[in-house]
């Protein structure tokens, strides 16, 4: 079974968000980077499937040269091949990203049996790339998956199939698909393994296949809408208020306790 997992290099969460001087992008120069949690789970799921059914896992990302670091992290988890579609650092929208991935898939001599995506990227949350890739390739697609089972063909030449499950408004939905197919998974479908020392050493020595897709300029811009500028919302101000000192603070303290509803 040949599985492709598409991942994205995203800034680590929890840091302070800073906007560039022109207000057009998020300044990530001081940010650490990682892979979206959904996509890390997609890599783990692919590795588990290959461990059961045989085959190999390819991880692919579109991004700057530094994104090779995130590909090596995924190789350390058990992926066997890494492909970098190198860009100049500009943010590609979902349309352009999907076009580049489709071109890479079509350019491979051996077709993939399964294409896995994270349900959405941690930074933009577009929810679009996997669906666009499936549409362009004419493949079945399901999203938001929390459980995945793959069955190899019982007879020689028989097509493999997948059963994908997801939760929707308190109900479990089950989808049966013939492979190849595109499936996007959500964080929680599994618990990604911690990379072993041999895995890290193997990933460090691995060769990353690199190519530079042409900038298509295809972006998602709804009719009549354009980006003017980005603005970081004002944070909630939290200050300690001194109610008073000594006996003078008692009335204010009683009022506060009554407001909180702790007085009988």
Image: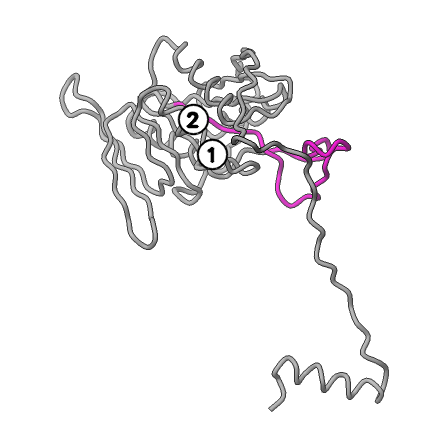
Distance CA(mark 1)–CA(mark 2): 8 Å
Label 2: few (<14), some or many (≥20) within 10 Å?
many
Q: Which numbered circle lies on residue 5?
A: 2
Query: Which secondary structure class fits the magenta region best?
Result: loop
Compared with 188, 264 (above or below) is below
Residue 186 in the image: x percent, y percent?
42, 41
> Residue furthest toward the front?
224
* Residue at image location 20% in from the left, 22% down from the top: 159
* Residue at image location 45% in from the left, 35% down from the top: 127
Name the quarter where the C terminus is drawn: bottom right
Numbered-mark total: 2
Residue 11 in the image: x percent, y percent?
62, 35
Q: Earlier in the sequence, mark 1 or mark 2?
A: 2
- Residue 5 is inside the magenta segment: yes
Report the span colored magenta: 4-33
Residue 63 in the image: x percent, y percent?
58, 22
Q: Are marks 1 and 2 in contact (CB under 8 Å)?
A: yes
* Left or right for 131, reference 212: left
Q: Secondary structure at mark 2?
A: strand
Label 1: few (<14), some or many (≥20) within 10 Å?
many
* Residue at image location 31% in from the left, 26% down from the top: 181
Depth check: give the residue in front, 168 or 183: 168
> Residue furthest toward the bottom?
264
Q: Secondary structure at mark 1?
A: helix
Residue 71 in the image: x percent, y percent?
53, 24
Name the quarter where the N terminus is drawn: top left
Compared with 199, 192 (above or below) is below
Q: Which numbered circle lies on residue 39?
A: 1
* Residue at image location 25% in from the left, 36% down from the top: 163
> Residue furthest toward the left?
155
- Residue 246 is inside the magenta segment: no
Compared with 14, 181 (above or below) is above
């Amino acid at each position: 079974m040949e599985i492709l997992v598409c991942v994205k290099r995203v800034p680590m969460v929890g840091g302070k968000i800073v906007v560039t001087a022109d207000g057009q992008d998020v300044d990530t120069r001081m940010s650490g980077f990682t892979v979206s949690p959904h996509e890390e789970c997609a890599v783990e799921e692919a590795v588990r499937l290959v461990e059961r059914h045989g085959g190999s896992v390819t991880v692919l990302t579109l991004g700057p040269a530094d994104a090779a670091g995130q590909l090596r992290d995924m190789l350390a988890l058990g992926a066997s091949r890494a492909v970098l579609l190198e860009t100049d650092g500009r943010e590609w929208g979902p349309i352009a990203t999907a076009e580049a991935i489709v071109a890479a898939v079509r350019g491979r001599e051996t077709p993939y049996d399964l294409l896995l995506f994270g349900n959405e990227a941690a930074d933009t949350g577009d929810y679009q790339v996997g669906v666009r890739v499936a549409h362009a390739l004419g493949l079945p697609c399901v999203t938001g998956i929390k459980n995945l089972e793959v069955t190899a063909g019982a007879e020689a030449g028989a097509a493999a199939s997948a059963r994908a499950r997801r939760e929707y408004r308190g109900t479990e939905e089950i989808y049966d698909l013939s492979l190849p197919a595109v499936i996007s998974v959500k964080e929680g479908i599994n618990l990604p393994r911690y990379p072993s020392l041999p895995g890290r050493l193997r990933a460090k020595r691995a060769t990353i296949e690199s190519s530079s897709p042409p900038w298509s300029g295809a972006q998602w811009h709804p009719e009549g809408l354009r980006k003017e500028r980005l603005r970081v919302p004002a944070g909630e101000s939290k200050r300690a208020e001194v109610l008073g000192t000594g006996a003078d603070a008692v009335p204010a303290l009683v009022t506060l306790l009554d407001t909180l509803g702790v007085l009988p």
